[in-house]
Every structure is written in C-alpha cells, then in structure tokens.
C-alpha cells in the first residue's frame, strides 16, 4: 500500500501567510481560553481531597450530594466517574488540613448513602504541595524548551532555531488552550503528555529541517522557498504515516486506558494533530521568512564509513 | 549483496535471548502472599520453619497455594486477598509473638524461575493498591529543639562552674545568657565554650543593664541540624514502617524537607497514619518538691526553674525545667511483666547514662517523673480561619522515688499493657527528631489497581495489534519486519524495566504504549527512504543500504529530542509521573537499539544475500 505514489507538490510555503493568521488566532484563542475559562486543574495542582467510590448499583448523585452537604461539606463536587456506579467526590483545599480525618469522614458519609459502597481511591494533596507541583510543572516545561533550544542551536543556525522554537512553543500552547476551552481536567498525567508533545513537536521539525539541509546541498540552483517546499513534500509521506501510527496507539489509550489515562491520551491526540500542522507550516515558514538560506545551515556532519552504520 | 556484520546480528540475537529470559517472570503474574520473618532478624533455616506455618494454616482450614523459604524468610502464597487475610489472622493467633507477618504479593512463577533468581517487575502503588504519603518535616522545629538542648547544657555548665545567671533563654535565632554580675563574663565564656567550642558568644547588655552573652547558630549548623532531623525522621519512619510488616515499603527523602513513604498493599490508612505520624518522646525530669503544684495551677505561674505538668489523673505536678534525659538518647525499649506489673525497660546511650547516673547519685530519695510527649498536627479554627497547629500533649505518666543509683538501664511502670507495648514500640522505632505532618496522601484500593493494570494492558494490546495490521498493510513484508522488531522492542523494554526494578506505574504503562507508537517512526523513516531510493531507479540492495544510511541522522535527532523531554520529566516529576519518564526514556534507548540494529539484521538476513530482487516488498 502506498498513499503517496510520487512525491506530492503541495505549495506549502505559499500558504504560510494564511497559516500565520490561523496560528495567531489559535494562540490568542488559547490565551483567552486559559485566561477567561481557566484550566480545570485537578487536585494534583489545587490541593484538596478526591475520593473515588464504587457503589454496587448506579450511584444516586443527588442523595450523595445531600448526604455530604448535611455532614458539613456543601461545596463538595460529586460527579460520575467512568461508569454509572463510580462516583468522584472532590473537596476544595481549604478544609483539607487534616487530610486523614476528612478522607475517613467522607467514606463514612458515603456509606450512609449505601453501606456496600467501596472506596477505590483517596487522594489528599496539601494546597502548598499542589502549588509546588504546578510551579514545578511550569519549570519543567521551561527547562525542556531551553534544553531543546540548546540542541537546536547545536544542530542548526539561529533562523532555523527560532522557527523550531516558535513551533515548539505553539504546540503545547494550543494543547493546553483546548483543555481550557473544553474545561477538561488537567492533572499530572496531562502535564506529562504536554511535555511529551514538546519532545514530539521538536522531533518533527528536526526531521523536516534535516531534509531542508540535505536539499540545500544537493539542489544548488533552487530558491529557498522551493527547497522548503520540496523538503516538506518529500517528508510528507513519512510525516503522515508516522502520525497515523502514533495516533493508533494513542487513541487506543484514550478509549481503553480507563479514566486515569483518558486525559493523557486526549492531550497526545490533540498534540499530535497540532504538531503535524506546525512542523509543516510554522517552523519552516518562520525560518523562510527570517531569510534562511544555504549559509544558515552548518555543514552536514561527516559520518564514518558505511560499515559503521547500522 | 548486502551483508551485515555478523557480530551485530549475533549481538542482537544474544540481547533478545537474555531479554526473553529476564522478562519471563512477568508472564506469570502475582498473587497475594504473606511474608514471614523472625522478629530478631535471624534468618529462617530448615524445612520445619516452613511446615510450622503450613500446619498452623491447616488447623485453621486455610490453604496456601505454595509455601517456600527464600532469603531467610518464609513466603506463603494464596489464591486471593480474603484468604490471605484469613491466613494472617490464623498465624498471628496460633503463633507466639516472635514473627513479623507482612502482607505482600508473590510471583506465581514456578519454583525453577525463582531458583535462578528471576523476579517480575515491581508494580507501583497505582497498580498494586496501597498508600502513598508525603511528610513535611518541621525543620525549624528541629532547630528550636537543638537550641533548647543548648539552653539546658549551658545552665548545667554555668552552674558547675559557679557562674550565677539571671536567665538562660533559647530564642528563635540563638541562646541568650543573662549574667547576674558582669565580672563573671570570662568565666561564663569558658563554661559556654566547654559545651560547644564552635559557638562563640557575643557580649551585650539587656534593658536592665545586665551583661548578656548571645550565641547564634551559623547557617551551616542550622543546615546540619535540619539534615540531621530529616535523616533521623527517615530512620524513624523506616523503623515504624518495618514494624508494620509491609514488605517492599519504601521511605525516601524528597526535596529539601519532605519524606515520601510508599506502603504497597496497606489499606487501613487512618490507623497507619496515626502510627507513623505521631511524634512521641519521653523526658525524664526531677520533681520539684519545694513548691506546691496546686498553688502554681491556681495562679497559673510556675515558680522560676520549674514547669507545671499534669498527671494522668489530672493532678498538677511541678517538675524541674532541666531535662535529665530525652527520648533521643534512648537506644532500646521493651515492655514486659515484672512482679505482676507492666514495666517498660529502657536503655540509654552513653551520654544519657552518664547524665542519669549523675542525677540519681545527687538525688537519691527524691522523685523523678517520666513525661510522655505526643505531638500531632491538628486543624483549629482561629478567628474563623482554619489553621494547622501543632498540638502537643505532655503528660506525666510515671512518678517514682529514686531508690538507688542507676545509669543506662532501668524500668518505668505505671502504664497498662497495651500502652506499655505501644510506648515501647514507638520509642524503639526512634523518637522523631522533629514534628512531621502529611502534605500529600494517596490511597489506591487493590481492585482499582488491578483494573488499572487490565485497562493499561488492554490498551497496549489493542493499540499494538492495530498498529501491526497497519504496518503490515502499508509496508507488506517490510511492515512485518517492523512488527517483529516492535515485539522485540517491548520484550527488551520489559527486560530492562525488570532489571532496573523500577516500579511500573499506570503512566509507566502509558509510556510503554507511547514508545510502541513512536518506535515505528524509525522503521517508517528507513522504509520511506528505501522507497525514495527505489523511485530514483536504484537497485534493491543499493536502496536498502542508502535507506538505512540516510535515515540514521533523522532517527537519532528524533530520539534525542524526545529523550530530552523524558529526562526533564524524570528530574521534575514525582510519584507516578516518574514512572512515565522512566519508561519513555528507556523506551527511546531500546527503540534506538532494536529499530536500527534489529531491523537491519532481519532485513539483511532475509533479503541481504539475494543477488537479484525484482521487487522489494516495501
């Protein structure tokens, strides 16, 4: 089977201006979504108490809420989690000082609703720990970007570096923005997925840039815009197939991995789609508009004789 | 012809064989088990050590699936958790109290797998169920404690060298000694230097014009004290965790002032946390016989040099401010009966013994009290706001006349059997140096853990199967090669994870799934290159060769960048996220090995030796 029997000739670079507009709108939209709607931060980051309980039959949310409110927790969030038998109770951090007592109290309250209830999981995170996890997460994102910038600086000159970094910033931003827009729960595993998206994004850009470099060397007469188009078109088949392959497993994770992994899977699905777009348009477009040419590429490293190759 | 160096092919085959072998124990799964060790730490030996437990189980009508001796411990494996718990109760009821019975999981692998020393991957709490706790150590409290010890030592030394003082007071940043006469400054300095030479006092005057000497801890000393407090807490928590009888429990330092405790398999959070988090310690003080305690209670003012306490009965009692010995000088504690009375036998360290000897020698006939101090962090409402405060309860549990001189070994009485045992256990586990409180707590039930495993594994299997079909459909025979390589990759990854004994978590499984999804990228890069070379009209063999060579730099780049993200995640992540980082990073390394060397080996093996290939199935 082959999707691309010959190298396609899509004029990617001619469309880049349109994509700048689109990306700007999307980024502004993401900022607005994060700023206005805010991220639906999970207990990992806000601190508080989360209890997952399984009832023998479909859970009665109304009775659970009333029971919790009567016991002094009117601001408890109660929702269905995964199946209709599973209930997630979440309490804000202000009341979670002595975590242990509260979690045992909640299980007592739930057993008044149905004595056969089973507590599946309880998580108590102090407010300070939550804040720390959030700052640590932001730090981690910053450091990942810096390290990757360093790597790009080693491999390419600055014009390509700027393009790569912009594309790499662009991708987690849109992913997080979509999570804010849809109010999807943002927990530690989603953060891990966003960091994986950063790594994935830069790897896509590098594969395209590698080909740009190769073509700058082999096609001495071509204009930079032609070189970029040729490189993107030549790698298009690989880009699409790789994305499909990764999407297959990530979708499996999203659909079958259970509640605990669905957020992780979804963040990667969004991330992969965004990465595909940005590696084709944003990174190359910016490098081209910064006037990237033959001299901006370091000479390709000489590798050893063929026998040393795998 | 497209020959591949034979040693690389052999290396690949060898690595895969070893991996298969290492990964083998994971196929059998685990079952609930009991692990029994002797309380005195001596290893079990001989077949009768196993049979005593199996016969105890037999009389309680509980059957173990298997029972064996390994590493000096007896392991009994059961069909399910209820049986396991029945068995534990049966053994604890039937056996004398000299074994530690720990609930755990044991591999269902046959005996020969065990015999060659293979064990399955260890599972994280989210897959196995259990409790994850993060304690914050009150390091400032540890410094305060150090200062109050210093205060005591200065008092003693100044008195010994006959320097009269108005007061010796521990303050947040140091200790201030106020002298009655300024002429004694030099003597006071000498006395204070005898306590700790590294602390140099600074002279000054207080509001009344009295000469003062002030010492402050240097930043290094503060740091040292804080580190010591954390280390001591880790030791104490480890001891307490061991006393709980949970195998595979871990106690680790996390960051500057935190300790993470993982207790797989434990379900009763409330009880465990109570036992782990309470700081209990003892203080021995002399009873002040000169003043009346009732009077002090009525006025609310304890006379100078004394402190007001309560006995268990509620009776007030005045004790001297100077502490003779504190709990951190205890080296052993055990509870037992003597003359029909419950007694806790205590052993002190050398310094504590010396101190005790001196005090008892000087105070025969006087009374000495044992103060039991328990510290717990509670939530209090102050001005409508909830504030976490340390609640310290100090009770005189025992008051007795000193009948003779003793030093480092003695008994205290006046507690019930249960209290005596608890006290001995807590004291033996080590008095915590600084108060700790819980800042993070995660409790995962065993059924949720199993559900997580099932879902994660199902996602992996379904995702991989779909991917296999896709690759085979798109790249035909070469796609099948990629599938085989992918299987090799997962086997190698599982083997490496097993070897590292890094706990597998749910995000860790997600990392394996993601590795599978990203690993084929290397194959795709190679195959697309081969197709391009073929399109250019190159021969099959030349296309294969060029495909591998030209794709290599892109493969390396792609993996290095993802590795960067993985390493950062590892350094910044906590708990389950670390598990994701580990599998992702290791997965990249195994991908580089299998996708590059493995694919080349297989393709050379199948197509490399053919001189004429009409059409390459790529």
Image: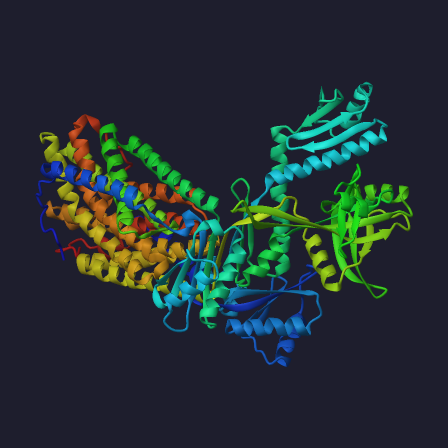
In the rendering, at what x and y percent does residue A57 appear? 38, 73
Whether residue B590 sits left or right of residue B255 in the image: it is left
Residue B226 occupies quadrant:
top right
User: Relative to B230, does residue B200 appear above or below in the rendering?
Assistant: above
Q: Between B141 and B135, which is closer to the camera in this rendering?
A: B141
Kindly indicate the quadrant of the structure image that contains residue A83.
bottom left
Q: Which residue reaches farthest top?
A: B183
Q: Position of residue B306 (x, y in %)?
A: 79, 40
B220 versus B611 height, above or below: above
Picture residue at 19% right of the left edge, 33% below the top: A286
Give how far across and how far down residue B485 sits, in percent: 30, 56
Q: Residue at x 54, y 64 (%)?
A: B104
Q: Quadrant of the C terminus of chain B?
A: bottom left
Question: Does residue B519 appear in this view?
Answer: no
How is this picture coloured?
rainbow
B21 up-or-down from B433: above or below: below
Along the horizontal axis of the image, is B156 left or right of B8? right
């Amino acid at each position: 089977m082959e999707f691309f029997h010959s190298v396609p000739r899509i004029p990617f670079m001619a469309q880049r201006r349109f994509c700048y507009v689109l990306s700007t709108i999307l980024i502004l939209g993401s900022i607005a979504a994060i700023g206005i709607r805010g991220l639906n931060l999970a207990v990992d980051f806000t601190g508080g108490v989360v209890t997952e309980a399984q009832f023998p039959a479909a859970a009665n949310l109304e009775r659970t809420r009333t029971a919790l409110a009567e016991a002094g927790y009117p601001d408890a969030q109660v929702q269905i989690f995964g199946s209709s038998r599973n209930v997630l109770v979440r309490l804000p951090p202000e009341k979670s000082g002595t975590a242990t007592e509260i979690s045992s109290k909640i299980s007592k309250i739930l057993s008044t609703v149905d004595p056969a209830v089973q507590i599946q999981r309880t998580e108590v995170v102090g407010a300070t720990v939550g804040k720390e996890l959030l700052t640590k997460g932001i730090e981690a994102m910053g450091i990942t970007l810096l390290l990757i910038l360093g790597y790009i600086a080693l491999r390419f000159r600055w014009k390509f570096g700027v393009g790569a970094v912009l594309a790499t910033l662009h991708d987690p931003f849109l992913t997080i923005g979509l999570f804010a827009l849809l109010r999807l729960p943002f927990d530690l595993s989603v953060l891990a997925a966003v960091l994986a998206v950063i790594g994935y994004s830069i790897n896509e850009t590098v594969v395209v840039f590698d080909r740009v470099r190769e073509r700058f060397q082999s096609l001495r007469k071509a204009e930079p815009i032609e070189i970029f188009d040729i490189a993107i078109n030549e790698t298009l088949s690989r880009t699409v197939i790789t994305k499909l392959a990764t999407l297959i497993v990530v979708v499996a994770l999203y659909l079958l991995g259970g509640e605990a992994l669905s957020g992780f899977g979804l963040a990667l699905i969004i991330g992969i789609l965004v990465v595909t777009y940005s590696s084709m348009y944003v990174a190359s477009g910016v490098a081209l508009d910064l006037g990237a040419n033959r001299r901006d590429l370091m000479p390709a490293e000489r590798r050893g004789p063929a026998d040393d190759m795998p | 012809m497209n020959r591949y160096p034979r040693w690389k092919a052999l290396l690949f085959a060898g690595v895969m064989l070893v991996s298969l072998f290492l990964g083998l124990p994971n196929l059998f799964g685990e079952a609930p088990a009991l692990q029994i060790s002797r309380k005195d730490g001596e290893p079990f030996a001989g077949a009768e050590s196993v049979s005593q437990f199996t016969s105890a189980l037999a009389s309680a009508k509980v059957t173990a699936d298997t029972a064996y001796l390994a590493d000096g411990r007896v392991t009994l494996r059961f069909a399910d958790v209820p049986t396991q718990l029945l068995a534990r109760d049966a053994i604890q009821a039937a056996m004398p109290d000299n074994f530690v019975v720990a609930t755990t999981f044991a591999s269902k692998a046959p005996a020969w797998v065990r015999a060659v020393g293979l064990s399955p991957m260890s599972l994280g709490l989210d897959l196995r169920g259990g409790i994850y706790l993060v304690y914050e150590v009150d390091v400032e409290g540890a410094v305060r404690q150090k200062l109050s010890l210093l205060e005591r030592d200065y008092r003693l030394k100044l008195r010994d060298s006959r320097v009269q003082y108005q007061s010796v007071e521990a303050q947040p940043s140091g200790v201030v000694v106020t002298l009655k006469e300024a002429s004694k400054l030099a003597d006071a300095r000498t006395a204070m230097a005898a306590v700790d030479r590294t602390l140099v006092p600074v002279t000054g005057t207080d509001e009344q014009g009295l000469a003062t000497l002030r010492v402050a801890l240097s930043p290094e000393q503060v740091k040292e004290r804080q580190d010591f407090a954390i280390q001591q807490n880790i030791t104490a928590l480890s001891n307490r965790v061991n006393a709980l009888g949970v195998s595979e429990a871990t106690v680790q330092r996390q960051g500057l002032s935190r300790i993470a405790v993982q207790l797989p398999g434990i379900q009763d959070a409330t009880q465990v946390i109570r036992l782990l988090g309470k700081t209990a310690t003892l203080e021995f003080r002399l009873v002040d016989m000169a003043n009346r305690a009732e009077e002090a209670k009525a006025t609310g003012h304890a006379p100078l040099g004394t402190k007001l306490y309560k006995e268990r009965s509620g009776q007030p009692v005045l004790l001297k401010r100077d502490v003779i010995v504190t709990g951190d000088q205890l080296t052993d504690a055990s509870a037992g009966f003597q003359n029909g009375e419950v007694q806790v036998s205590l052993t002190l360290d050398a310094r504590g013994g010396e101190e005790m000897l001196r005090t008892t020698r000087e105070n025969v006939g006087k009374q000495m009290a044992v103060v039991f101090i328990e510290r717990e962090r509670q939530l209090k409402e102050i001005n409508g706001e909830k504030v976490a405060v340390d609640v310290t309860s100090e009770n005189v549990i025992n008051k007795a006349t000193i009948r003779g001189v003793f030093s480092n070994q003695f008994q205290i009485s006046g507690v019930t059997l249960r209290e005596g045992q608890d006290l001995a256990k807590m004291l033996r586990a080590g008095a915590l140096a600084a108060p700790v409180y819980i800042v993070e707590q995660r409790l995962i039930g065993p059924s949720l853990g199993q559900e997580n495993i099932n879902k994660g594994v199902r996602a992996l299997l379904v995702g991989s199967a779909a991917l296999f079909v896709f690759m085979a459909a798109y790249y035909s025979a070469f796609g099948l090669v990629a599938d085989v390589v992918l299987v090799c990759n997962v086997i190698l990854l599982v083997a490496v994870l097993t070897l590292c004994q890094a706990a597998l978590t749910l995000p860790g499984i997600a990392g394996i799934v993601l590795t599978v999804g990203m690993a084929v990228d290397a194959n795709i890069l190679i195959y697309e290159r081969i197709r391009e070379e073929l399109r250019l009209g190159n021969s099959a063999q030349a296309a294969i060769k060029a495909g591998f060579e030209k794709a290599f730099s892109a493969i390396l780049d792609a993996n290095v960048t993802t590795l960067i993200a993985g390493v950062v995640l590892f350094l910044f992540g906590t708990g389950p996220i670390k598990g994701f980082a580990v599998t992702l990073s290791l997965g990249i390394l195994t991908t580089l090995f299998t996708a590059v060397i493995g694919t080349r080996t297989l393709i050379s093996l199948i197509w490399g030796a053919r001189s004429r290939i009409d059409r390459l199935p790529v």
